[in-house]
Amino acid sequence: MRPKAILYVALGLSMLLSLGMASPSHGQATCGGIGALKCPADQACRFETGKCNAPDLAGVCVPVPATCPTKGPKVCGCDDKTYANECELLKAGVREAKKGACGKTKPSSAAHPAAASPKSS
């Protein structure tokens, strides 16, 4: 019985060590998550796109320049604000909802004339 227990403990430890060494982020530090881990001063936390309402979401720390470029592909933040580029979004500490500008969330009254004026009885 004792040799089996030692074998299982050794197997379990080796599995834990191998899982701890396998990192999909290729050396990037983890941020966010349940521990609300912070990135170093010259980095920001990048989360998976489209995960706006995911609680305790973990991301990876990525380098961010002190000054963001003025041009670049626009991105829509989870705060429904369009950012000039990903750098601006990351500096604001906002998760990315989607690539490109944010769309209108509510239809305008011009698109629905019946909604603009009340019905008469």
Image (cartoon, helix red, strand yellow):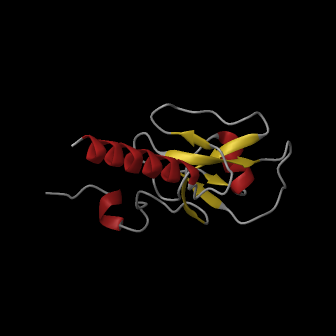
Q: Residue 1 location in percent, x, y?
A: 21, 43
Q: In the image as oriented, which residue stretches furthest toward the left? A: 121
Q: Residue at x 57, y 59 (%)?
A: 24
Q: Nearer the viewer, residue 56 or 3?
A: 3
Asked where in the image residue 99 lies, by quadrant, the reply is: bottom right
Asked where in the image residue 94 lies, by quadrant, the reply is: top right
- Left or right: 84 with respect to 66? left
Q: Residue at x 34, y 48 (%)?
A: 7
Q: Residue at x 30, y 45 (%)?
A: 3
The answer to whether residue 78 is visible is no
Q: Residue at x 48, y 60 (%)?
A: 104
Q: How many marks?
A: 0
The answer to whether residue 85 is visible is yes
- Left or right: 43 with respect to 8? right
Quarter of the image with the C terminus is: bottom left
Q: Nearer the viewer, residue 107 or 39?
A: 39
- Left or right: 29 with respect to 119? right
Q: Residue 4 location in percent, x, y?
A: 27, 47
